[in-house]
Image: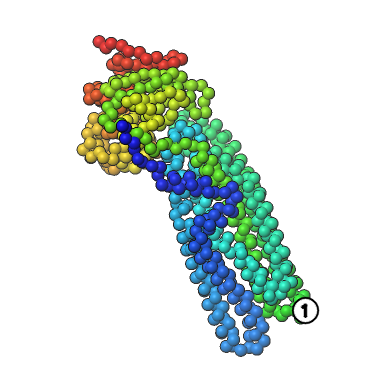
Amino acid sequence: MIPTNRNIVPGPIEFLLSLLRRHSKHPMRELFARLRRHPGGALRLFISSLIINILGLASSIYVIQVLNRYVSYGVNGTLITLTTGAIIAIVGEFIFRQLRLAVGEDIIGDEDERLSIGLFGLSVTTRLDAFEARPIGTRAEILRASERTESAFGPPALAALADLPFSLVYLTGLFLLAPPLAMVTAGFGAVLLLLAWNSQRAAATAQHSLNTAAARIGSLVMAGLQAGETIRHFRAVDRLVEAWSVAAAQAHALRRHARRTHHASSAWAQLVQSLTGIAVIGVGAALAVDGVLDVGVLVGANIMAARALTPLSRLIPLAESARAAAQTLAEARAFAASTPVEPRLGKIIPGWLGKIEARSLAFTPLGGNTPLFTALSFALEPGGVLVITGKNGSGKTSLLRLMAGLIQPSRGQILVDGVDLSQISLDWWRKQVSYLPQEPIFLEGPLQQALSDACPEASPEDMERVLTQVGLRPLIDRHPQGWNQLLGEGGRNLAPGVRRRLALARALLVDGPLYLLDEPSEGLDRDGAERVYAQMIALARRGKTLVVVSHDPTILRGARLTLNFDGAEPILESKQLQ
């Protein structure tokens, strides 16, 4: 029986998928959802808010008492007592605000951090063909979902939400002082709520367009950073600048509209608060003239009315940021739902020696209409060598990527000792395959790390051996940083020939039963090409199975079995070597 690899989907990605399922389409519901998930923390948050808002009444009470008692009677002891009590209340309010922030952080916990890790983990474990079908700017925007979520649904937002019910505390206190003033304040509060609703509705119509424009800008930024040589030498500056001008103008217009909408909402909120103050003072003054309330109560009521409206005015920016975050999360949810993840479970084949077969294999690139091949079949026994040749774009590299398990066939099978590759553990499979891609890329970091990432169990002696085999050891010894020289921009700070030699060294270090080599001698000088030929001969003598894409005449002359992609369908050809 073939054993099964027991690796499971990483915890952060499982968390991400469950979290995205929980997110509601309505932005504010996510705040309530976070509170529901942590009822104990939510209780502490609301208790803290209750204490904060009760202590907040102290400033109004202080003004009323000073004007009514101290100013009327001039007893200094009264002023000292009232001032001391007010200071204690203000300091207590400050302390409880800090405690409430800590409670909010406890409620959030590591949720946003895990969302960030999960999104990144999902992006690097999705099926490569499906992931690459999305524009790079769109991928970057999806990865920003956690950043926007943290900003919109973090502890300050939870505190603002917790303060909302306590507008009633101030309104109740105001009602006890002067019911007419409470009614005036409540009316303006209803206007603020209407403004918050309207602001959220306006933001909803623009956010998707903003995200799309940001994704386009991101794609152009990546082109400007990574394709500088192409842009300059092939005179693409005008085209790129024109594309940037159009995208930047669209993004600027959308941002300007968003700014104007936000500014208008803020201005209306400020207007309502100012009008509230005028209305409270005006109505209160009339009541004071009629003898219904005194001046101290009037001033204190004005302070209390402002405190009652403050939580409501915070709803407008809160709703706008929540809407932006909810839209980004919706796109991340769609990404997670529609993009298949590479399977982590699968079979392993102990003692596999390199036997591999393609049976009726067909492949059409994702989003394409024309298949590259429709019924490709061949079989390689352990130690077999297959050289693939043919015109550009005919599917040679795609076949190697299919055999590496990076992309999936449209139809047919790749069989590993008779087992469909789709049932094989990819983690195990990639330890069996030494892969040299057509365009070698390295993660940023020291050169030694680039090798140890591919084969963590390799010793320094193993690394030195493969670097010597490809002729890089003298170059490394001459470099001031030696093993620690940094690879940046995917290794593009290295000369193309050096990068290809390093990629070959990486493949030799893995040293699996199957070697997939895409144009191994391309761009190499004579010494580099000779080293490639020597390594291929040595690998064949050691019984490694080789599948090589090449136009190199030397490699083609030495091939017993070739797969020619020049026709409508690949043709398998064999010849007897002299």
The answer, for residue 450, to whether it is visible in the render is no
Q: Which of 415 and 265 is in front in this view?
A: 415
**In the rendered view, does 278 fall on the left or right side of 381?**
right
Which image quarter: residue 428? top left
Give the residue at mark 1: 289
Q: Nearer the viewer, residue 404 or 417?
A: 417
Residue 302, above or below 381: below
Q: What is the x, y in percent for residue 438?
A: 38, 28
**Residue drawn 71% across the image and 80% down it:** 294
Q: What is the x, y in percent for residue 135?
A: 51, 35
Q: What is the x, y in percent for residue 321?
A: 58, 52
Please state, as top left, top right, bottom left or bottom right, where the N terminus lies in the image: top left
Q: Is mark 1 on a helix, strand or loop?
A: helix
Residue 413, above or below 478: above
**In the rendered view, does 41 fall on the left or right side of 349?**
right
**Residue drawn 54% across the image and 74% down it:** 90
Which image quarter: residue 461? top left
**Residue drawn 57% across the image and 63% down it:** 162
Amino acid type of disc 1? Val
